Structure formats: C-alpha cells, structure tokens
Amino acid sequence: MSFGNDALPLSTRRQFLIQSAALSAAFFWGTHYVARCAAARSRALSSDEVSEAFAAFARTKHMPSELQAWLSDPAVQRIKPYRIFDNVWQVGVRWVSAYLLKTSDGAILIDTTHEPFADDMIEKIRSAGVKPEEIRFVLMTHGHFDHAGGAERLRKVLPNARFAMSAEGWREADESANATANTTRAWTMMKRRENDMVLKDGDRIRAGDTEVLVLETPAHTWGTLSYVYDVRHGSKTHRAVTIGGQGLNAISGPEQLEAYIQSMKRLGDESLGIDVDLTAHPFSTGLTEKIPAVLAAKPDEPHPLVDRKDYLDRLERLADGAKKALEAMRKAA
Ligand SMILES: [Zn+2]
C-alpha cells in the first residue's frame, strides 16, 4: 500500500515503529472492510484527493471516512480493463494496479490486487485476449495484501503460472497474512509451490519476446521488488518500471529509510533508461485521470505516459519524503 509522502510525525524511534504498525493495522482494517461489507456508496475521488486523504491518514492515524468509503465501495473499485500500451493491459482495480504483459509466448502478470476482485481479474485477462492457462508468471512486488492478496485465488485458476517474489517478500506476505488471522481483516497468502520462484536482483524473467528485469528496491518494505520491461507504442519501444510501493507506513527504522533513498536514486539511474512509470497505485501518479488520453493515443503520436522528467521528479519527491522522515527519526533518537 502507499501513502502520501509526508514524513510521519515522530517523537521517538520506538513510537515511530508503533505508529507504523498501528497505521498498517488501521489501514488493513479499513480496506478489508471492502471485502466484508456492502459499504455505503462513495463519492468519486480524484487522484489528488485520494493522495491527500492518505497523507492525512498518515498524519492523524485516522482514516478519513471518505477515503474509507471510497476504498470500500466495490462499485468504485471495479474498473474496466484497458490497454495502456500495445503490449500491456491494466487489469487491476481503481486503487491498485495489476499489469498484464502480452508476449509472443504467453503472458506475464504483475501483482494480483486483492479479494474480492481476483475473479474479476480473470475476466479482465480474458477480455484482453489472454486465456488463464496462458499466464506463465505472476510477479508480485511485495508481500502486502493489496498486491499479493489475490494470489491465493489466482493460483487455483492459473494452472501454468509460476508465482514469484523476493525471499523477503514471501516472508513478509506470510507474516502479514498471519497477523490478520481470526480478525475481520483476515486474508490468506498462497502457499508457495516447488516451481514458484524466489527472485533476486538482476534476475531476468523471459517469456517469448519479452524480458522483465528484476530489481531489489528495499524501500516501502525490505522485500520490495521493482520490475523493468519494454512497452510498445506504434513503432516505438519505451522502458517502463513498476515500482513496488512507495509508502512510509511499513518502515522498521533508519536503515530502511537509508535503503529507501538509495533505491529511489538507483531507479533514476540513466543506465536503466526508464521513461515510463507504470505505478502500482494509480492515484499516486494521477493515472486514473490520464486514462482517456491513454486510450486516445495514436500510434504515430507521443504516448502520454512517456515522460522521464515526470518520473525523475516523482523519485525525487519520494526520496525527499524519506529524507525528512529520517531527519525526524534521528532528531527524536
Ligand atoms: Zn504495501
């Protein structure tokens, strides 16, 4: 999950940890309300409003009721799938992305969103012209329920898929799911099978004409991975990344914030050549508002999501947020 970039107010490091844990717990509760209840219909919120509401949640530890209603309203969260590049479809929900990469030999799915939306995702995958049995890899960014929570169900309906995450990501997912057992926000993490994968930095996942580069980018969680891959628009090929979360709500201490800052720096490195930011949370880049422009993009015109400067600016904002949190943590120590 992902929050606004504001540093959390800190008094002591210990308190920070408690706050982080409480925030995560409150957030889980809030969103799991989604799955359990037929919530009141919510107002449509813009990406900026959602980002601001998450930032307020991070500051106050109280989820704004409007945000909770928005997250909890299946009618709002169920969005139509859409083709975001020639070879990539968005098959996620309104607040969490899942990207389907079509290749010359099967397909790759990045992230699984969460229940009760896994079956919807299968329909979205079909509507993108991909049969469930054609999915070869399911690459998860990290072990939080909003990215890995759909895997338990998807495992059963994607017979040929190998599920993949970092070693720490798998551990985080088990820990995170176990922590919710016997609560109203319980979720189940899939059991890893022998042919599932533990990914490491520099791994390359190949399917047909497509290769996904795996980067270990400890930041939002220690186990967070980011995935780098080519996206096509007309005759042009661009380099996209899906960064695994960016919130400061699961920070265990100053070392993690230092790692966060380094990861953002690395993601901006020229050698990676990234010019497309395919975000794990659509509201964090205003992707939702850009959908009409994405759909209208003509093959011989520039694609609206190709913008390296915009991407680098976002990395800088994220790193700045981590730096502020680190300063505050050090001051409080
Ligand atoms: Zn997360």
Image (cartoon, rainbow, N blue to C red):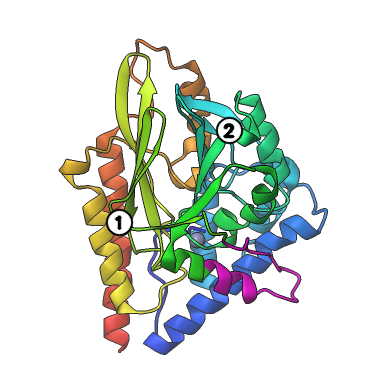
Q: Which mark is residue 189?
A: none
Picture coordinates of residue 119 (x, y %)? 72, 42
Q: CA distance from mark 1 to mark 2?
A: 26 Å
Q: Are marks 1 and 2 in contact (CB under 8 Å)?
A: no
Q: Quadrant of the C terminus?
A: bottom left
Q: Give the left or right position of residue 271, taking residue 146 as reference.
A: left
Residue 122 belongs to the span the image colors magenta = no
Residue in view at x 63 percent, y 66 percent? 28
Q: Give the left or right position of residue 2, taking residue 277 as reference.
A: right
Mark 2, other Cα within 10 Å: few <14 / some 14–19 / many ≥20: some
Q: Secondary structure at mark 2?
A: helix
Q: Which contiguous range is marked in magenta?
A: 173-192
Residue in view at x 70 percent, y 49 percent? 156
**Residue type, mark 2 in image:** Glu
| Foreground pick, 41 / 241 | 241
Residue in view at x 31 percent, y 70 percent? 257
Q: Which residue is mark 2?
A: 134
261 relative to 150, above or below: below
Q: Secondary structure at mark 1?
A: loop
Q: Which mark is residue 201?
A: 1
Picture coordinates of residue 308 (x, y %)? 26, 36
| Foreground pick, 42 / 148 | 148
* Badge nearest the viewer, 1 or 2: 2
Q: Give the left or right position of residue 298, taking residue 192 as reference.
A: left
**Residue type, mark 1 in image:** Asp
